[in-house]
Image: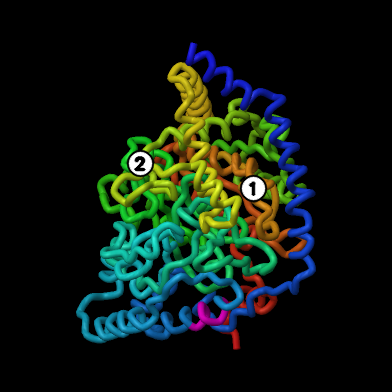
Amino acid sequence: MMDNEKNRKLNLLFNKTSIYAMKYGLKVIKWVVFWPISLSQKFKKHHKCPPIKNRLLLISAGELADEIRNKKVTCEEVIRTYIQRVQEVNPMLNCLVQDRFSDAVQEARAVDQMLATTSLTAEDLLKIKPLLGVPLTVKESIAVKGMSNNAARSTVEENIATEDAEIVRLLREAGAIPLLVSNTPELCMCWETFNPKIGRTNNPYDTRRTPGGSSGGEAALLGAGASVIGVASDIGGSLRLPAMFTGVYGHKPTPGFVSNSGHMPSSKDKMWDSYFTLGPMVRYAADLPLMLNTIISDKTKAAELRLHEDVDISQLKVYYTEDESTVNLLTDPVNSEIISAMRKAVLYLERKYSIRAKKVQIPGVKDVIKLTALVMGRMNGIQNIFQKDESNPDEWNSVTWEFMKSFCFQSSSSLLALLYGPVKSTVDNISESDYERLIEKKTKLMKDFEEMLGDNGVFLYPTFVDAAHTHYEIFHKIFNVAYLCLFNLLELPVTQCPLNLNSQGLPIGMQIAAGRRQDRLTFAVAKALEEEFSGWIPPQCAEVIKYKQNNTSLI
């Protein structure tokens, strides 16, 4: 009897009538609440980041490391150049939580001293320190020893990392030099980036707009040319959405290869590492395999990804979907400029590599939001704003009381961090029989993609329905994250790939997914498209395009 009542509630929540009610309810909220906010943003002064005038800010991490190894430039000059760029753009963007500039300069000097005395050749150094002297930025939710690692929690004053996260340790070991930790929303629970402690991070292409979230600080730095490589986290697209909004590359690796240790929040739930991954964000596609190979500690396991193998794109099966709004009723139609860019990308691949791409529509994607809520809500042991103490995330204070405080403006917690409470409570009350039925749907969806992609297929898919929106609009666009959550649900590797700028000068892009352990395929296609679509295009690009064409230093 109890199970029947739970099933009835679930069916009421997700039947077609309820879906339409949720969708159009959000539209009402959009026009009543967010339209005035968006309108006020549009009347604010439009700022873009100042143009880049130093060639060191315009080459890849691999090229920077090569120049440092071969003593064409000092490591200190590289580090100081990036520090100067951060200081130039941060007042406008508000990306920075805490810097370690002084330590970074000292570490750069140590690299230069080592190069002056070492007997190792440049080839030797390439093997043992492929990122020698390259500046690195890190999402604040990932531990960097001695730096803030609090994930903007309102319930905890501060948390200083006592050691590096494994991913940071490996990057340091490869020669990278951390510069700072960057802004994130509270407990990474938002697809925009703002919190009461640091404030709101802005988009380098238009400060009236969001860089996305939860890795918005990293994305804004990369898009502004103030970082060349960064590391971030992804459990529902929080690495890929910001990468699209700022015109850079973000990769969610095949789960199980990159250690998630040292991240806030975390969980010991057995499902956590299947859905949550740390991964690289970069400005240049060539740095994707370099970064992924570096951040996998088990090199025997890394060999399974075959990242050093060449990929013959002409032998790939290419599938694509332009829009899911006719199948997934909760999502909005994809913007026509994104669809046009995707079609150009497909046409380029077909002509360049003599392949025939196939347009597909997968019926099971209509359940992505439901299945994502189910899986995330069923996980236990995730740090949250309701927990009574640090040692036990599953022992909560009253959710109702926290909401009452919020309604009375007495809570500093963010809205989505608050909403985690009722979502989890709802999902925890789903009957086991209904849970198993939904898991069967997830398994079927995974099997459909596995059969379609195999070990030589890629799937092109929108990253989001539109380019970067004005601040706070995510609250009425929330269901469009289905495009992102799909690949966490499927446990597949996926790369956000920029596809030039739209008519407003804002970056647009798409996702490139592949089968498990086939990360190299997404990298190869991203690199091929970079050649045609220019990859990252800086916010003030006139002088930069001139540099790229002439391959000479900017004055």
- Residue at 47% x, 26% y: name it: 429
| Residues in magenta, as a range | 84-89
Q: In this view, does 356 lie above or below 438?
A: below
Number of residues whose C-alpha sits closer than 10 Å to that of mark 2, classed few (under 14), some (14–19) or many (20 or more): few
Q: Does the magenta stretch include residue 87?
A: yes
- Residue at 49% x, 11% y: name it: 1
Q: Is residue 449 magenta?
A: no
Residue 216: percent from the left, percent from the top?
54, 61
The amino acid type of the residue labelled 2 equals Glu
Tag 2's secondary structure? strand
Gap between marks 2 and 1, in whole Å?
A: 36 Å
Q: Is the magenta stretch mostly helix, strand or loop?
A: helix
Image quarter of the C terminus: bottom right
Q: Which of 504 and 74 is in front in this view?
A: 504
The amino acid type of the residue labelled 1 equals Phe
Q: Mark 2 points at which residue?
A: 395
Q: Which of pointers 2 and 1 lies earlier in the amino acid sequence? A: 2
